[in-house]
Amino acid sequence: MVRFTVLASGSKGNSTVVTGGHTRILVDAGLSCRELFRRMALAGEDPATLDAVIVTHEHQDHINGLAVTARKLGIPVYFTEATHRAWVRWLTPRRQMTYAQWLEQCRKQAAERQAEAQAAECGCHDAETDTAADVDPVISAEAAAVEVSSADATSKAPESRIAREKPDPSWLPAVEFFESGRPFRIGDIAVSPFTIPHDASDPVGFVFEAEGARMALATDLGYMPPNVKAQLKKLDLLMLESNHDLEMLRDGPYPWQVKQRVLSRVGHLSNDTAADFLASAYDGQATYVILGHLSESNNLPELARVAAERALSNHASLLANRLVLAAQDEPLSPIHLS
Ligand SMILES: [Zn+2]
Ligand SMILES: [Zn+2]
């Protein structure tokens, strides 16, 4: 069975479940764990059957519930190494620790956890209860950082001792690294990560393939470079960013610097740029085209839809392209491809 379920798309959180064969992958975890589970239930997806989380980039709207969700489900998280590093820095912004020291600390903590788990009898719950698990990781990290700073100021306590007392907010059950441009597999799903132009450490889009069906996810990109266009061919499903209407953005409420950032070549794709691609380089083969990451301040669903429909009307295969708009506040119905 091949299925694509968008749980959320936009600047308040992004997350999608991709199912192929017996494998299910959560692509980004931009909502709290609790909200992700709630939306999965609404869409008929079972969180307990997820096999892995994979991350496009470290911006908050893509990783907000990442650590809690992965821990709660006990599943690995796939990152590029640079994105993982950036995510760790984001969670532990004020720790004076090199990446190598951090890895060593993780290794020790994992060993400690394993020892504790072995010591505990069956039936014990993970120390991370529902309530504790949903604590905002940023707040946890900040709390830890404050503790480190104040301890440093008063007693010069060794940081390693403090780190042991405070659980590491970036601890994950398992971390797997992938590289952009190097396809790999997670269970029954073949994953092809490709570089996208965006202001993050090492941002990627994905093509997922299972049972002969190909699905691509390309949001958070400032423009459509040749390598991205080349990836978005021979698809059954295309999820493409249609972030803003240029006029609405120019006249809208964002400060000038933010407008410049969104408009830049490492910002977000406008309705017009998405439509240009759909009208020209796109081969028109996908059964479903999902428009995603629509801005709530600088776009209207109807503007995005009209621009894309007009672009798709250039293709003889228009009828094959069912246009769907992803939403910020509710999941889409699962899209079945086989
Ligand atoms: Zn982003
Ligand atoms: Zn985003």
Image (spheres, rainbow, N blue to C red):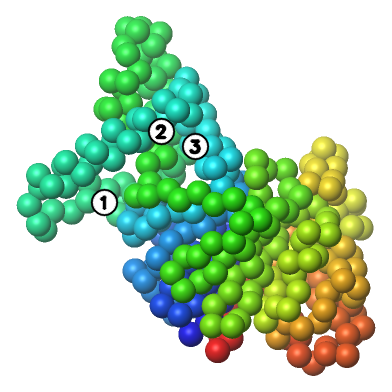
The residue lying at 89 percent from left, 58 percent from top is: 246
- Mark 1 is on which residue type? Thr
Earlier along the polypeptide chain: callout 3 or callout 1?
3
Earlier along the polypeptide chain: callout 2 or callout 3?
3
Whether residue 242 is visible here, answered yes or no, is no
The residue singled out by tag 1 in the image is: 129
Q: Provide the secondary structure element on which disc 3 rests.
A: helix
The residue singled out by tag 2 in the image is: 103
In contact (CB < 8 Å): disc 2 and disc 3: no
Left of 102 or right of it: where is 195? right
Mark 3 vs mark 1: give the one in front.
3
Left of 36 or right of it: where is 222? right
The residue lying at 35 percent from left, 18 percent from top is: 159
The residue lying at 66 percent from left, 49 percent from top is: 203
Earlier along the polypeptide chain: callout 1 or callout 2?
2
Mark 1 vs mark 2: give the one in front.
2
Disc number for residue 47: none
Image height of 86 relative to 289, above or below? above
Q: Percent position (x, y) of residue 197? A: 76, 50
Confirm or reject: label 1 Cβ below 8 Å from ligand 2: no
Q: Residue furthest left?
A: 121
- Mark 2 is on which residue type? Leu
